[in-house]
Structure formats: structure tokens, C-alpha cells
Amino acid sequence: MAQVVQMEVEASLKHVNGAMAEIFSRDFDPTAVVSEPLPPVVAEENGGLVKIIAESEMESESEREIVLGKNVHTTCLAVTEPEANDEFTGDKEAYMAGVLARYRKTLVERTKHHLGYPYNLDFDYGALGQLQHFSINNLGDPFIESNYGVHSRQFEVGVLDWFARLWEIEKDEYWGYITNCGTEGNLHGILVGREVFPDGILYASKESHYSVFKAARMYRMECVKVDTLMSGEIDCADFKVKLLAHKDKPAIINVNIGTTVKGAVDDLDLVIQTLEESGFKHDCFYIHCDGALFGLMMPFVKRAPKVSFKKPIGSVSVSGHKFVGCPMPCGVQITRMEHINALSRNVEYLASRDATIMGSRNGHAPLFLWYTLNRKGYKGFQKEVQKCLRNAHYLKDRLRGVGISAMLNELSSTVVFERPQDEEFVRKWQLACQGNIAHVVVMPSVNIDKLDDFLNELVEHRSTWYEGGKAQAPCIAADIGTENCCCSLHK
Ligand SMILES: Cc1ncc(COP(=O)(O)O)c(C=O)c1O
């Protein structure tokens, strides 16, 4: 099916490029669903798997085989030069409309089967369609208007104030901006830490997001990786040992409010206590809280360590397209006003100041965030958080009920389980995998029906993978603990 579609597209392109008037083959159906061709299971190199050394393993110099996705060049839609003749241009418009209609169908289909990445795909921003015709750009400082008038700063600052209230910092004490993503928030938070302590050492648990280690490389910072507990939380005993070994230098710490793979929430209070016990005074450390994943969920979970600027933290960031849900990647970064002057520069060309990472900044993103925050409010998010946690428990219980190893951290909606054996299944459900484990991140768009469909399909496939019980499912106790493992040894 995918190949047929590919050939149709290629055929149409040939017509567009050539002088022929017929743009579509006769059976071209612009509303048909394009099922994306699944990538080959492995790239053909080395006679099979591509060998990549995972960053966390580089130190131990062991290699792990990982499966890369497909090379998009095999399916890309080439850009073709427009015809000089108007008549052909009209045909090309029709062709492009057809391609876009097919693409839309694909998106609908792929959205239906998405479970592995922490994106809330359930939103309706129809009311904002009218704003698509404007090139809205908030370049420069959100609080200082620039000479470029087509901006949305009034919405951006409204959103920032909302988050400042959530994380308990007064309006005149914070500075922040709407970023392009959680990664930019981390890059900014760690940069502020580095500006405050130019010779500081960056500490991050080894289960921190790769953007944290990217920041260390970009800023050429000394970076110390801290061990984690089985849950994925930072191991504060190891943290203490490492702090004591570097007592002469200030500490810049990345604290995870939800790790990428296991959804583990670092205990912020214990991190602060560990710093204090190790002799680090409040003016000798800077904490950046990476709340990309659960930064907006934890405030609504009673037992979660509170992320608050009433505590000695320097910055917090969150992704906007994850729990909130947004058609484009975005995020929010908040830090203390007192820190930002070191980073800020006047830019005459803008008639503004700049302390951000990027130049141009997406002015549509603040509108989307402002719109959702207004519609849902604190209460709406609280309800959604409760629903996600309930549904995550449902999935974990059902997995365990049918004998599949699974783990769910108490404060999390990330359900970790054994990696499915079949890469096609992984791709269909868009699962994120690492080593022997995979996860489903239960977001507001993931309901019980979707989880049931997924589970039923998984159970059916497993009976083939494990030959109806004759073959053994792998032991993943080393990843999720013996109490969560259902292998033949541990069940
Ligand atoms: C813990 C954590 N930090 C940072 C990021 C990066 O966020 P983004 O994808 O918005 O750049 C992620 C992404 O999943 C994450 O899980």
C-alpha cells in the first residue's frame, strides 16, 4: 500500500515537472490514508545492527546495539520548481492540496496510535486559526517591547505570571520567557547557573535528559554524573560522596521533575539537604529544576516534593507541548530576576534587551499556552493529572495481571515495561525504548479504550513472540526491580 502511494506521488511529481497536463493518476484518492512505510528494522551496516555507543556507557566503554529509525530520504516529497504557465500552477496547487490532504489523514492515523512520548495530543485551538496569517515574533526580552510590532508579549507575560504563581515567586522577583522546548529551558537554566558560578561543576543524575549533557558539552563545563536508584531518582548518597570530593568548587545541580525514561521525580528537599550536609551554603550552589515532563503535573500531586522558589532554587523549566498540549513544541523558563542581569545585553537593533538562547522567538506559542491556561485553569489541570495517574495505574495493573513485567513510580504516569520483541509493534504504537525496557507515558489524550486496544494487541503478539509460553520473556529485574519483574525466576 505504502509503495503504491509512493509511486503515485512520484508519478504525479514527474507530471508536474514535465509538460503534461494530467497531474494525478486516475485512481488517485486525495483523502486516502497514507500508511507510513515502516522503517526497516535495522540499518544495513555491519551486516545488521548499527553499533552506537550510548553516552551513559561511554565511560564503561561497552557498546550497545540500538535500532535507528528509517532514512527519510527514501520517502521524502521533493520540492519542484513552479511552472511559468499559470494553468500548470493551478494544477500544481491541486496536486499540493492532495498531498496535504493525504498527509492530514496520516497524522490522524498516527495520532490514534501514539503512546510512547509525553505529548498531550488532545486539544482544540480552532479559535486561533485566524492568527495563522501573521508572522508573530517575540524576539528579545518578553518584558521590553522591541521595534518589531507584530508580537504577542502581552500574552507571553500573562503566561509567565501564571507559572510564576504556580512556582511561588513574586512578579517583581522573577524573569522568564517562553522557549522553543524543554531543552532550551535546560540550556538556559544551566547557562544562568554557569554565569552565576563560572567555575561551578554541573551535577546531574545519569538518568537526566540528554539535553543536560549537551549543555555541559556546549558550555564546556565539568560535569559529574550521579548514580540513580532503581526508581530512576537521583541517589543522594552517591551525590554526597561526589559533592565532598569537589568541595572547593560551587555546585550547579540539575534536578529532574520527572526523568525521561522512568518518570522518576528527584526529591528536591533531599537534594537541598544533601548540599547543606556536605557544607555547601546557599550562596555556593545553583539548582535548575528540569520539569520538562512533569513540571506542570507535580504541583497537583499531594505527596510530590513541592517545586517552589521559596526554596533555594535558581530556575525551573517545563515543556509546553507535553502535558498542556500544543501544535508546536514550546516551553516555559522561569528564573530569579537577580540572576538575569549577568546574561542580559542591550540590543540596539531590536530596541530591546536579550537574555534568551535563541534570536527570533515563536510568537504563536504564547497564544496557544495562554488560550489553554485560560480554558483549563489550575482546577482543570488538577483533574487531568488525577485522570492520568489513575489511567497509568490501570495500565500497570493490567500488564502485571497478564504476567508482563511493569513498573510505575508513585508520582508518575510513565508505565515502564518489557521491551516488545517486534520493532513493527514498537513503531506502530510509537513506543520509546531503552535497552530492555519500553514505556507508555499516560497523558490526557490517552484514555482507557486506547490502553485496552494496546494491551490486547500486546498480549496477542506476545503469544507469538513467546510461542504461547514455550519461550521465556526476558528478565528485566535489573531495570525495574525484582518486585516488578514477572520473568520465570521472579514471578
Ligand atoms: C526530563 C526531560 N527533560 C527535557 C526534555 C526535553 O524536552 P523537549 O523535548 O521539549 O526539548 C525531555 C523530553 O522528553 C525530558 O523528558
Image: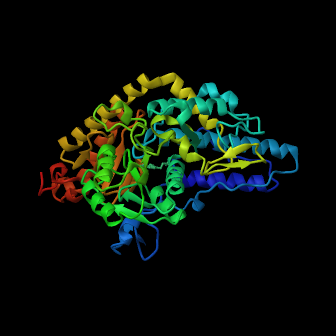
The answer to whether 141 appears left or right of 461 in the picture is: right
Residue, x 47% and y 29% (percent of image)?
165
Residue 376 image offset from top left, x and y in percent:
48, 24
* Residue 449 visible within the image: yes
The picture quadrant where one finds residue 445 is top left
Residue 470 image offset from top left, x and y in percent:
16, 58
Reply above or below: 27 against 487: above
Number of marks in the rendered image:
0
Residue, x 42% and y 76% (percent of image)?
47
The answer to whether 173 appears left or right of 367 in the picture is: left
* Residue 33 visible within the image: no
The picture quadrant where one finds residue 106 is top right
The picture quadrant where one finds residue 279 is bottom left
Residue, x 72% and y 36% (percent of image)?
145
Residue 365 image offset from top left, x and y in percent:
60, 37
Residue 40 image offset from top left, x and y in percent:
46, 62
